[in-house]
Image: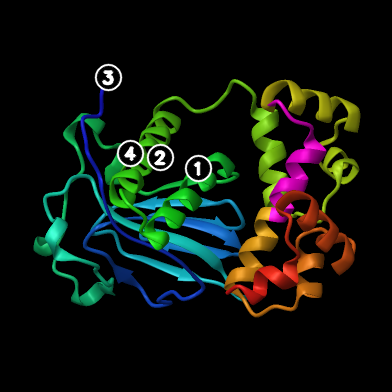
Amino acid sequence: MGLDFHPYTRFVSKSTYYLAQRVTARDCRLLYILSGTGSFVTNEVTYELSANTLIYYPCGMPYRISSDGELLFITVNFDFSEKYKGLGVMIPEASELFRHEEMLDTVPETAGDVFHKSMCFHGAVSEGEIINRMHDEYTTKSIGHSEITDSYLKILLTKLYRKYITPDTKNPLIHLIKETVGKDLTLNIGKIAEKLNYHPFYLNEAFRKSEGCSLHEYISKQRLRRATELITTTHKSLYEIALLCGFSSHSHMTTAFKKEYSITPVSLRKQI
């Protein structure tokens, strides 16, 4: 069944700033957590936030975000069509002042009630890669960036719809591994195996067969990706970032960066 929608990306931002009070947005939103922990609270449910958590919430839904520390996240504001394209960026309003008749409801009828409710996906690594690409396109604004960003958004929303109506039961172990890595990048394969009560060799082989790379390679790439985000979007010291991302030292992180990106963390920060 086709969903028959053509989404419009209104705004994409990487930030640590959020409105802590109870607010409501006129358009639909995606919230993807890069680092930190907290909670996302609606009238019906509370979702725990950690790295690689993806939240979808529809227009007109009251919500509140809270955290004891610093959340680093990407937010995507969008409509399911270009009907309200000319209205520009919209700031959420205090829920008690929100007027529901001003809501931009463009959710496609072909999706049933799926997108009329909030959804939470933990360990959403592949979805996070799409959102990161959207952010890159939106911020660089190269030729055709709008079309590419909207295409990524349609792929992402279709994946979420598919996940909702057909939960991934094909290989729940791989999902659990990714979720465990996303929550704590300091864990090595041995510690992950211990937490999940499997032998390290079995975990690594299962991961390789499913994903086409070793678990060690996957962990390394996730550490580098998270370190890059923290280096370019926070003022944390490189030593602190190295430890947060699972590197044994600043020099260990530098070696990994030079091997993967041909640049050092120091040089990367100087480019900002």
What is the CA distance from the residue labelled 2 to the residue labelled 3?
17 Å
Indicate which disc residue 1 carries.
Answer: 3
Q: CA distance from mark 4 to mark 3?
A: 15 Å
Amino acid tagged 2: Leu
Q: Disc 3 residue type?
A: Met
Local SS, label 2? helix
Which element type, helix, strand or loop, lies under badge 1? Answer: helix
Check the image and report above or below for 157 versus 52: above
Query: Which residue is identified by label 2?
Result: 156
Quadrant containing the N terminus in the rendered view: top left
* Dot 2 crowding, Cα within 10 Å, few <14, some 14–19, many 20+: some
- Magenta-drawn stretch contains 238: no
Q: Could you tell me which secondary element the residue under label 4 belongs to?
A: helix
Q: In the rendered structure, are the residues bearing label 1 and label 2 in contact, judged by CB atoms less than 8 Å apart?
A: yes
Q: Dot 4 corresponds to which residue?
A: 154
Residue that appears at 75% across and 28% down: 207
Q: What is the tally of numbered marks visible in this picture?
A: 4
Q: Earlier in the sequence, mark 1 or mark 4?
A: 1
Task: Identify the magenta region.
Answer: 212-224
Q: Is residue 36 visible?
A: no
Q: Which residue is mark 1?
A: 127
Residue at image location 43% in from the left, 74% down from the top: 18
* Distance in Å between CA atoms under marks 1 and 2: 6 Å
Above/below status of 156 relative to 86? above
Which residue: 53% across, 47% down? 128
Quarter of the figure with residue 205: top right
- Residue 125: % across, % down: 58, 43
